């Protein structure tokens, strides 16, 4: 009788390679691996063969980089999404799309299970499982790496015993996740929050000290909140993000070093390199400053923070996330124009912004004779604006 | 019969110098000037004489830099206060203290009026007048610069006619405000948001390109949210902020270039240099990331934003500001420890943080064998955490 | 040469009647009056003639009750809009629509001005003027009642002198505003916040003591957040709101007595009767409790409060209001079902709710044997949910 | 060798009675029961004997009603705490205090464990366990009712087999929790959200239909946010809350019927009777409307909602709760004065409020000749208040 099937999210790394064998041997399942290309394509070169070599009955690769850019990156960018003000949701953003691919593959291949290789203390297990439950509340999720209770050394031991290649070595002691929007680096010396991350942890960014001695100016064009051109040249979003990352990385820009609060209740020290994501969020946000009305801008800051938190918490497919999208969607048509960035020695500054939808009105703002602002109005404004405090103060002094 | 008296906030600049004469001549008042040293002392060298020369009957100088640091800067820092995420409230922070000095001086000198030199389109008029009304709801405020309806050229003309020195020249085309917490630069070419601010606008910061080729590491020590040492050396808060500004400025760090929403309803392009303020806020905030519990930290981000908005809007003396202080005060005792900053070529990064009150728990966070985290708990957590979305999804799919 | 024209928002009351004459005589304008029927039709019986009698050159009546229901009431209801948790925005809701009618009439009749009869201390002047500026930033607004500086007695005097009928008498000492969504009552004894509003202030509601001795049960049906039926009978929204008001009013339900914070900075004691609005908001909100997911519901409570504040502040036509509409629109399709209300002696309680989109799951919720809830999951959930507090507590106790 | 000890929170009900036996027999522990009187004293009459009869080695009763009022009720009232706008936190409020009593008793009696009788699907297990972890992160918590996996029928069976009295019968089919602040009723027919709760579920409140035909007016006096008198008569807080509950209940006021979102992810239909709590929250809130400044009041509404959510979620002992207390504490001194309530046939309305700290200023608010409001200021105020929307509108129309 045929064995039941499981579709396993496969990265080619140690944990998911061990998981193939474990699911086959311990759970007695036919393992179909699914490697999802969300822009980290270059790392997936031989992933198909790897999976089959380790024991998968089928090895799928889904290239959804373009969908990732269009449906996920644009929304995160519209929300200037930075978890805890710093982390642009690299892995958080790809998980719901990978979950979608998993569920679709399971349906297509009549698999009763899907599986992921996350351990029990990270955020990704939550993101996978909540997304999968939202997409198909009936499908069962296996989390072998959480259940088998192996230490990293156990995993390596297990891998060796089963002839599974072990990619993490003393020379490359980090655990990596990678996609179009950036790169996550974990483990090893990075777990000490007092120690500066060493340069060997980074791949997309040079050290600021090694960056060129000349600044580079780059103009990014936006239409309706979406970046569409660099230096006047139109390009696809995937290409544009890659290009932005390349420019930023070459100037040493885009390293994030933070203490982060995980959903599962612990603080961790996290290191990212996100030159493209950070530069585009800076530019997008600067264009919003120019084109969105004050009250909207102030309120949107709270919406943006909530948005990042929700996505970080794995709630991409949730009704609150949908409602925040509804809010944000009304605001983006005005976010059309150009932003001038200056990259230099690890830094990226906004040094210019312009837009046909600009709400900056020179005649109102200037201190030059062109001034059209109604100075007379100020006295009345202050009188009524300050009245509640004045009444409160009078009462308090009178007591 | 003796003329009535007015106490005028005096900076030594063109507008307030003209205001002395105008109040004396047009309003028929005895003008007592008050120059308030909130850390910009060096610019006040001959301010006393200047005022008398122009026609003040008395010229006061109040040195409140220490009070400014203790009562205003520490609170703004505890709130990581950045208006619209960028501006550390330089002028916004000094106005309520200057207002307090004005009201006290008026009481002491039996003056029926206080006056400021702000025009009708800025924020400072609101900050002065709302603060003054809160401190003494009965005193009357004069705003000659708002009322006399002169252009800048008119002012210069008026000044020349009355032998008032004119400090703003073609060589120094900017309008400046300055205190311990930083420096505001306005006017001229800065009013074009597409143009990068020229280097001649800045005094506290060198251009990143001119900064040293070697990075500098600095350890800042905090006790209860207040910075108390640099590089292990204890110093007064005034000295510490100055020192921090000096280090940051020498590395080209601390320039802010933003589109800002004024309380009076217009967008303006604002330029600041705030090397000390920004570096300390970065360090303080990083230490909070380490020592404050997650829910508190996330909620406090909203409180901090509101705090900055309130102070920017001139509501320092307001019951909501008091209540936010009450919130923040409970959070700061834990913010004790050290932060390591790296300055280099215009940038300042947090590269280390440590604290006896740290909530980062290596044994919980590590992927090494020391791990004490309960991996078993994750499945149950995810099940209940994701349950509302799962129920919602089931229902929606069923329809 | 022809005089310039002004379109005046006309209620038929004293202030706007006086305004006709004042605009004609003092401002030398041809006055076109516009009475807008937003559901208070019965009070507009002879308004057309009244205006002409007082001196209008033309007297328009616009019946927009249906538009008011469709475009304004449904949105306010979707937001459960209650300013300061109590006031369902009666006048606040009609002002933007009246402003729209004014601007359209001005365009149609080539009028250079529009005018309203509000004084300088209320909210309505702001609502009119901000709405008008949003709809036509170029048109000029006249506010004769604010400018002429008459006391109420002066107005009556002026009215008598010009043979203008004076509707407010000792027998009816209140100032009223009225529309489909409810009725505002101001002035007189109501200005003492310690005194219970007398029964003669109310028209739509009987005193609770005079209500029937039997409760009445009413089932309201909703589709996509919009009420569509009462007791199973489908009806138009205008009819439905009227019917609901009639039922509630007959049972003495719907009186509001509150201290309210006006936008212009003062507290006032306000009295409303809003039987239809309050009953529908109660029902709508109860249906949301059944059909909206928890996180969405909690976040929406904040959105709803902001919505009410914005509309109260006159910002109906604003980009933040549009964005909140975008948020809310995604939430309403699920708000479909029935709510059972019980009216009795001044009260209205929700005593039942049901929906095909209900997220209440009996099998999960019950304590009976049908229970399908995963009790095992709780321990893991609590462990991780409480972990941040546990770590914080450990650290604090250790110090 | 002596058995280890456990301190069990004991109510005298079925579940905790079964738990005594289960802990003794299955876990081989000496069971010390602790009945905590948080104002429901009358129900604890023979609780001491009951526990010993079932097999406890010791039976403690702690009377902390006064502490409950002083430390918990006053804070909840200061926050107008209503979870989801409706539920005044009856059980949520007592759990942290009971947890504190448990931990203290465990320390005193050298018990290694504490235990509660909650099942796995309610909120109370979370409140107990998170509170206990915060108070003593090292102590172990047992939750026998969650672990033993019995249905209610199993429990009854088990009880009968062990001669444990079974209080819940067909005549009293509800599960009750009770304290000074109110009463929770669960189970049975109440689980159908379409059915009106039957009168036999209620004990503290008569049916509205059975309430007196005459309204009753009651004046409640507050000092610093705390109610101190009824009808001018000073009394202790415990007595005052009881008195208020008695008055309200006699008039049929204080029944709550709602769909509630539990922390563990499910919606449930909940029924409460809380006549004292609701009446006092209404009065307290009305006094805040009179005495707190607008911006503070609007912001505090959000703080209040968060406060209720936190306490409902079991986070009484958490740093965010402490910080919110810090916020609220600054606001309460002004909440001093009197509120007049009217009870009638199920309803309770605020019909008057007065205070020496009142910010209602008759001279500013009145439409009578006493008016001191600056009408001139309005035009300037509106001009600048509406300016951002006007600029936005101009720009949008121009495109």
Image: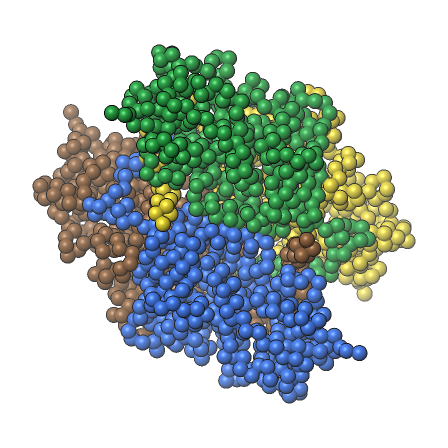
Chain colours: A green, B yellow, C blue, D brown
How many numbered marks appear?
0
Q: State the residue at coordinates (28%, 47%).
A: C365
**Picture quadrant where residue B134 is located:** bottom right
Residue B210 visible to the viewer? yes
Up/down of C158 relative to B165, above or below? below
Up/down of B210 relative to D292, above or below? above
Looking at this view, is C89 or C153 the one in front? Answer: C89
Determine whether, in the image, residue D199 is placed left or right of residue C248: left
Q: Position of residue D268 (x, y in %)?
A: 31, 50
Determine whether, in the image, residue D326 is placed left or right of residue C12: left
Determine whether, in the image, residue D173 is placed left or right of residue D137: left
Up/down of D242 relative to A148, above or below? below
Q: State the residue at coordinates (51%, 49%).
A: A326
Q: Position of residue B274 (x, y in %)?
A: 68, 36
Q: State the residue at coordinates (18%, 45%).
A: D152
**Picture quadrant where residue D139 is located:** top left
Looking at this view, is C57 or D324 the one in front? Answer: C57
Q: Position of residue B273 (x, y in %)?
A: 70, 37
Looking at this view, is D345 or A49 the one in front? Answer: A49
Q: State the residue at coordinates (56%, 21%).
A: A202
Looking at this view, is C342 or B207 the one in front? Answer: C342
Q: Position of residue A173 (x, y in %)?
A: 48, 16
Residue B103 visible to the viewer? no
Up/down of B262 relative to C181, above or below? above
Q: Quadrant of the N terminus of chain D?
A: top left
């Amino acid at each position: 009788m045929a064995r039941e099937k499981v579709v396993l999210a496969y990265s080619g790394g140690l944990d998911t390679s061990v998981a193939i064998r474990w699911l086959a041997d311990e759970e007695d399942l036919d393992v179909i691996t699914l490697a999802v290309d969300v822009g980290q394509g270059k790392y997936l070169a031989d992933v198909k063969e790897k999976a089959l070599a380790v024991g998968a009955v089928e090895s799928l690769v889904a290239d959804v980089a373009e969908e990732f850019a269009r449906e996920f990156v644009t929304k995160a960018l519209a929300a200037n999404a930075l978890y805890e003000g710093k982390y642009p949701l690299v892995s958080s953003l790809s998980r719901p799309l990978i979950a979608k691919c998993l569920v679709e593959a399971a349906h297509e291949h009549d698999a009763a299970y899907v599986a992921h290789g996350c351990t029990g203390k990270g955020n990704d297990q939550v993101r996978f499982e909540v997304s999968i439950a939202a997409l198909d509340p009936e499908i069962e999720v296996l989390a072998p790496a959480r259940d088998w209770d192996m230490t990293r050394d156990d995993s390596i031991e297990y891998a060796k015993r089963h002839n599974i290649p072990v990619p993490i070595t003393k020379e490359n002691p980090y655990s990596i996740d990678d996609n179009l929007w950036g790169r996550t680096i974990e483990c090893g010396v990075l777990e000490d929050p007092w120690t500066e991350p060493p340069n060997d942890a980074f791949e997309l960014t040079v050290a600021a000290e090694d960056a060129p001695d000349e600044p580079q100016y780059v103009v990014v064009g936006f239409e309706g909140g979406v970046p569409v051109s660099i230096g006047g040249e139109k390009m696809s979003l995937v290409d544009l993000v890659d290009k932005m990352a390349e420019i930023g990385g070459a100037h040493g820009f885009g390293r994030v070093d933070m203490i982060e609060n995980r959903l599962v209740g612990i603080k961790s020290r996290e290191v990212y390199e996100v030159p493209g994501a950070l530069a585009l969020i800076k530019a997008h946000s600067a264009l919003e400053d120019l084109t969105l009305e004050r009250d909207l801008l102030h309120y949107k800051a709270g919406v943006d923070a909530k948005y990042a938190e929700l996505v970080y918490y794995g709630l991409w497919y949730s009704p609150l996330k949908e409602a925040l999208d509804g809010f944000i969607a009304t605001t983006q048509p005005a976010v059309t124009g150009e932003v001038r960035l200056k990259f230099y020695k690890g830094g990226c500054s906004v040094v210019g912004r312009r837009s046909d939808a600009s709400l900056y009105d020179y005649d109102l703002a200037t201190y030059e004779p062109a001034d059209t602002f109604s100075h007379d109005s100020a006295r009345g404004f202050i009188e009524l604006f300050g009245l509640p405090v004045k009444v409160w103060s009078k009462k308090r002094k009178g007591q």
